[in-house]
Amino acid sequence: MGDLAISVNEFSDQVLRKRKLNYSSARKFWLTHKNQLSISYERYSHIEKGKATTIKTALELIKALNMDESTALHAWMRSQLDDPKHKSYFSAPAETCDKFRNKLVITSDQRRVFEECPFLYRILIYLALFSQSEQITIKKISNVFKISTIEATALINKLQGLGILDLRQDRLSFNGWCVIPEGDDFQNLRRKNFTSMVWHHFDKAYTDRFSIEKISIRRVQPRDIQLLREKIQNLFRWWGSNDLDESEEGSPFTFFVGGAHIHSFANDAVYWGYKK
């Protein structure tokens, strides 16, 4: 119970997030870098839980965890102060997460982690759908997705490390929308996510009542593609902002749409199962 009384500070939160991204436990991190650190494992574990630390130790941890030095030192300085006015003198250089109107927009730093593990996006969607009405824990994630507790813990560690989920609560909660931005930098992540959604769709039985499958093919000019894109964007805005009934009786529903140039018909016989 004594550990629970330790006050949490911003620097500790940043250390814990960064550690969770790359190491499964505090001990594993400490053992890996103990020669670079002048503190014991016990001392380090208390820092993760919110204990204040010296500037010497802070700099050692920043180096070992490859943290952004400016951001981390601002957080360390604010953690030494109690008066909000004094804290404001050391405000963060920039927010790393664009959150507004219940919408999380994936940042460039977060993108790299999601590209390495696209399954994180699926976990986040599940939490967005159910965590406000159900008690979601790591064990529940393990059971729902049929993965081991160790695997579920590693995935949640990454989401916590990215600052998307709360660091210090057993209940896992995410409310709102998670958005992958437009732009070339996010193209690979959008495609990985879209491809996974399509595979998942075709792996399930088709029913007219709950599934929608429409295809249209014609010759068009680039200007018409842009017009189609704008109309689809408007449809998605309506779908996202419309006040739909999302009560517990509601069923999770995936709405996706796509289109691309047909560069060649050469392999269509393979794609459509005519030949291998």
Image (cartoon, rainbow, N blue to C red):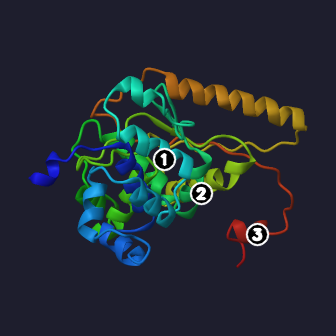
Mark 1 lies on a secondary structure that is helix
Residue placed under numbered mark 1 in the picture: 73
Q: Within the image, what quadrant is residue 145 found in? A: bottom left
Q: Nearer the viewer, mark 2 or mark 1?
A: 1
Residue placed under numbered mark 3 in the picture: 269
Mark 3 lies on a secondary structure that is helix
Q: How many marks?
A: 3
Q: Whole-percent x and y of residue 144?
A: 30, 58
Q: Residue at x 68, y 40 (%)?
A: 182
Q: Whole-percent x and y of residue 33?
A: 42, 74
At label 2, the amino acid type is Arg
Q: Residue at x 77, y 65 (%)?
A: 268
Tell me if residue 189 comes above or below residue 153 in the rendering. Answer: above
Q: Within the image, what quadrant is residue 116 found in? A: bottom right
Q: Residue at x 42, y 59 (%)?
A: 56
Other residues around mark 1 within 10 Å, as few (<14) / some (14–19) / many (≥20) = some
At label 1, the amino acid type is Leu
Other residues around mark 3 within 10 Å, as few (<14) / some (14–19) / many (≥20) = few
Q: Nearer the viewer, mark 2 or mark 3?
A: 2
